[in-house]
Each structure stands twice: as C-alpha cells, then as structure tokens.
Image: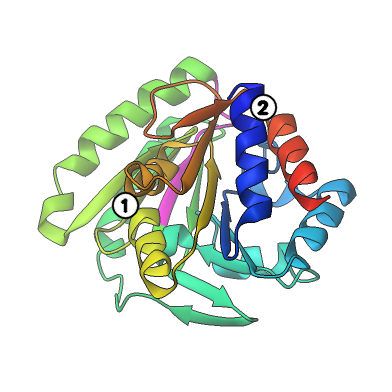
Amino acid sequence: MNDFKKAELIKKYRNADSRMVLLDYDGTLVDFTPMPVAAKLTDHLFDILIRLLDTPQTEIFIITGRGHQETDKIFANLPINIIAEHGAIIRERGRWENQINNNCSWKETVIPILNQITAECPESFIEEKDFSLAWHYRNAESQSGFAHSRKLINNLEAIIHSYDLKILDGNKVVEVMTNEVGKGKAVMKLFEQKNYDFILSIGDDATDEEMFEFFSHITKAYTIKVGNGDTFAKYKFTSINDVVFLLKQLSL
C-alpha cells in the first residue's frame, strides 16, 4: 500500500459514521512463536487497541483461528469482540455464542491420521479446538515439515468429502474443520447485520483469504494482506510493524 492510498484510508476512516475493523491475530498483530501460547500483545499495541475501542461508532473484531478459551485469556483485559476458530464461535459484549451446530464426531476419523503424521515428523504437534483439529509443523525441520504437510493433506483429501470437511493449508499448519466454518461466512453475517460505511480487514494467512474474497467487490472495504503471496486482498503490507503503525494513526 503506497502513502497515497494509506492517507485515503485514514481520511475515510475518520470521516465514516459507522466503522468495522477486523484484525487477524497471529502473523498480523503478533509474530509467530515456537508455541502459540507465547505470542502476546505488546503493551504499545494494547494501548492502541484501547484507544480504537474508545472511538465512537467503531466496532473492532479480532478474527482468529485460535480456540475461544485461549483467545479469551489473551484478551481478558480488553473488552474487544472476538471471532474465534475461524468463525465457529463469536464473543460480542463479553458473551460467547456458537455459530454452528456440530457434534464433531468426524474427529474420531481424523485424529488417527494426524497422530500418524506427528509420529513421522519430529517436533510437530496436534492442537485440538472445539470445532477443528490443527497439525502444526512450525518447530519441525523446514523441508521435512513441508513434505509431511503435503502427505497429510493428500491423506485427508481421501476422507473429507464423506464428512463435509475442508482443509486449511495455513502458515506451517494444516487444519481440518467442517465446511460450515469460515472467516468468509463469519464476516458476511456481520456485514449483513449492520450498514457499515467503512470496513478495514487485515490478515496474513491463507485462512484470511475467504474474508478478503468476500470484501473484494465491496468498495467501502479496505483489505490488507501482511506478507508475500497471492491474495484476494486489495493491498499488501510488508510486516506487522506496518499494521501497528496504521492502527496507531487511526487511533490518534
């Protein structure tokens, strides 16, 4: 995003009567860490979010793939709305509400497949959430982790259609969930509930592309991908520092 477009974004944000800001967490607000629990907001960013939350007619959402209990702890001291597990469960005004009805019986079939690939790939690990299963290979040797992730995706593709599941091929993580879940579906629901005249959506991962795609033809929506790679987002940022700097400018 060049300086002209950034100035345009800031001006439209300040002139808007009703704003929605959607922020991914890992890779967007905080750097990736060997263990997800270690990724914490800086005090500086915490203060910026507080100022944004105090802005009239502005709704801020953290939209993340993390489990809702973990995310609840991260933002325990911040009265912010949270869309967790890629849209499966949402916290608004401090109250969590499931967005889907799913008994997750499919996990019994998927867990043995993940266990097998974990045994084959040292330093990889499984994360079970309420509505999904994630296999992380961020700590594994790079080439081995990637090769095993391709093998895992191939194995999963043989069974997902029988259970109406989908695979998210993320940043050193492969995640399985029901087709009912997705950041695109979550933001569509929010968009339809209220007539926002300014929308900002920022994310870094393949899991954010559904969100970017939904907003791709909405002129009042600014979508920003952090990092390289193909994207449905209209603009790109190089790093998390760019995100923090923009949010700081919006909070002034």
For badge 2, the amino acid type reads Ser
Circle 1 Cα neighbour tier, 10 Å, few/some/many (<14 / 14–19 / ≥20): few
Q: Residue at x 66, y 23 (%)?
A: 3
Q: Position of residue 12 (x, y in %)?
A: 60, 47
Q: Find out whether residue 77 is within the magenta segment.
A: no
Q: Residue at x 41, y 60 (%)?
A: 187
Q: Residue at x 40, y 74 (%)?
A: 193
Marks 2 and 1, Cα distance to the nearest angstrom? 37 Å
Q: Which mark is residue 112?
A: 1
The magenta segment: 133-141
Q: Going by the image, does 39 lie left or right of 59?
A: right
Residue situated in front as seen by the camera: 22 or 149: 22
For badge 1, the amino acid type reads Pro
SS type, badge 2: loop
Direction front: furthest residue: 15
Q: Position of residue 192 (x, y in %)?
A: 36, 69
Of circles 2 and 1, which is in front?
2
**Looking at the image, residue 100 lies above or below residue 143:** below
Q: Find out whether residue 137 is within the magenta segment.
A: yes
Q: Dot 2 corresponds to which residue?
A: 239
